[in-house]
Image: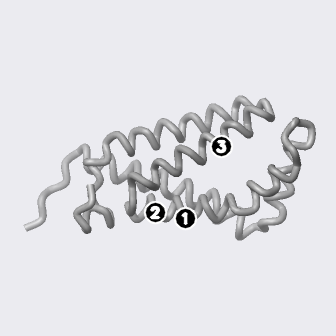
Amino acid sequence: MMKTMTDKELAYVLLRLVIGISIYMHGAIRVVTGLRNFVDKMSGGFAETPMPMWIARGFAWPLPFIVMLLGAFLLLGIFMRQTLACCMLLTAALTFGTAVKQDWMAASIQLSYTLAFFVLLAFREWNRWSVDDRLGKK
């Protein structure tokens, strides 16, 4: 007999799905609409900063694929501890870049994602309807 999901478990799975969709689509839409355009636009934002262009472009090329992978893992609820740690580290790198550009609005949005990742990591024991739950990996 299947146990009824608690409100906390339901809240967790819904937050995981919303964040997973957002993260996955951040990457997917950039691949679908033209990866080169994304790389040019993102790296172009560093033209007037001390960030060397080769670093900005080198970071931008794999970024949509990494983001898609992390988003897919969040949607599936797989390797949640590792996935959320990677999400937070990636967001730290993105926040560094936005600070170099002095784009404080984007930095505040990244901090919001970091808070969501923190909540998902801190309350991982509520992770239900996931691959990790099915495999008994809390």
Q: How many marks?
A: 3
Residue 66 screen position, x and y as percent: 61, 61
Tell whether label 1 touches label 2 (CB within 8 Å): yes
Mark 3 or mark 2: whose residue is earlier in sequence: 2
Give neighbour class at mark 2: few <14, some 14-19, many 20+ (Cα, 10 Å).
many
| Residue positioned 31% across, 62% down in the render | 132
Whole-percent x and y of residue 41?
84, 53
Mark 3 or 2: in front is 3
Q: Amino acid at mark 2?
A: Phe
Question: What amino acid is labelled 3 in the image?
Answer: Ala
Q: Is residue 119 above or below residue 9?
A: above
Mark linked to residue 73: 2
Which image quadrant: the N terminus? bottom left
Name the residue furthest bottom.
Answer: 32
Quarter holding the C terminus is: bottom left
Determine which of the numbered discs, if any, sits on residue 69 in the image. 1
CA gap between label 1 and label 3 equals 17 Å
Marks 3 and 2 sit apart, C-alpha to C-alpha, by: 20 Å
What is the C-alpha distance between the residues marked 2 and 1?
6 Å
Left or right, 47 with reference to 13:
right
Q: Residues within 10 Å of mark 1 (few under 14, many from 20)?
A: some
Which residue occupies 46% across, 55% down? 83
Residue 93 percent coordinates (x, y): 65, 43
